[in-house]
Image: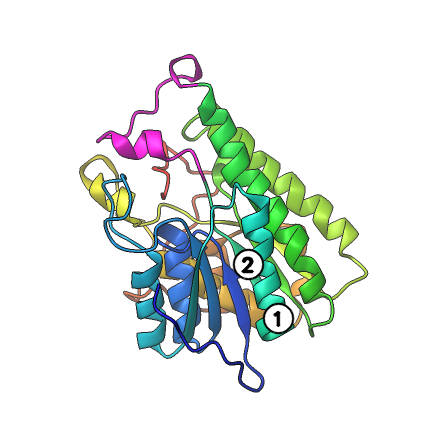
Amino acid sequence: MPIRNTSPVANEQVALVTGASRGIGRGVAIALGKASWTVYLTGRTTEEGATSLPLPGSLQSTAHAIDEAGGKAIPIRCDHRDDDQVRDVIERIARERVHLDLLVNGVWGGYERFVADAPPNFGPFWEQPLDLWDSMQAAGLRSAYVASSLCAPLMLDSPGGLIVCLSSFAARNYVTSVAYGVAHAGVDRMVADMAVELESTPVTVVALYPGIVRTENVLRNAEYVDLSNSESPEFIGRAVLALFDDERRTMKSGQALVVAELAGQYGFADVDGATPRSLRGELTGPLTPGA
């Protein structure tokens, strides 16, 4: 990667967004850039075409979009299944910025099998490879736990840090696969328990439920998905920003929050001016994973 200016500036707001080469992580990172944040972004795909997945997206393209939007991007290649690599990222942030205001856990593994097929193959659990479970847990639930654990000390001395773990309605309703649902249910319980242990600190932790998001993979399979009530990846970023700006956000700590419902509460719309409705109580089919 090219050398970038990483010098801190006064009163800068600093975020780490994991899994930011594409999908929701990319959208959140760009939304933060538009709000002039300094964004450390991680992922495994450094440049376009440097992956076997038939999808666009890379750390460099996300970083370019952040810089163009007026933010400061610091891309770092990181495989979040490797604790040492994650620790190196957090230690770099500690050296360069001392503090961290926001962590968005956007890494999620296991999509590779779904992305390889068009339409995605959501067969029953006995037809899925056993390592699908391991991928969802290791590069999903566990990666969020590790990043949160390593980032929390950097957030304790800030005016009020925020940890966001991307989750899904799959935590409560059958959506796509057994492994997918169990991993997201684990995210929700993890967030609830983290909130108990963070109660005496200024740090807030929440799980966030998007709806149907127009990620690269969803758009690739648009003919199989009803996009009439869909959300852009940046819409989730606007929810994160609204939460961060809420001086009473600690009252939401430990909760699973719905992006579309936050839009109604805080008064923001999607990038196209649309106001997607919440999917709470009206799931009628599978949500295509937003790889």
Q: Position of residue 248 (x, y in %)?
A: 67, 69
Q: Mainly helix, strand or loop, the magenta region?
A: loop
Three-letter code, disc 1: Arg
Mark 2 crowd level (few <14, some 14–19, many ≥20, 10 Å Cα): many
Image point 48% across, 43% down: which residue? 280
Give the CA distance from mark 2 to mark 1: 10 Å
* Closer to us: 163 or 142: 142
Name the residue that disc number 2 marks: 89
> Which residue is at the far top?
126
The span picked out in magenta is 109-129
Q: Is residue 207 visible?
A: no
Q: Find out whether residue 128 is within the magenta segment.
A: yes
Name the residue that disc number 1 marks: 95
Q: Find out whether residue 168 is within the magenta segment.
A: no
Three-letter code, disc 2: Val
What quarter of the picture does the N terminus occupy? bottom left
Q: Position of residue 97 (x, y in %)?
A: 59, 74
- As drawn, 219 above or below 62: above
Q: Quadrant of residue 291?
A: top left
* Closer to us: 47 or 114: 47
> Which residue is at the far left?
223
Image point 36% across, 44% down: which residue? 290
Image point 64% across, 58% down: which residue? 151
* Closer to us: 31 or 272: 31
Q: Quadrant of residue 235?
A: bottom left
Q: Position of residue 276 (x, y in %)?
A: 36, 55
Q: Position of residue 178 (x, y in %)?
A: 48, 24
Q: Is residue 29 visible?
A: yes
Q: Is residue 126 left or right of residue 93?
A: left
Residue 14 circle label = none
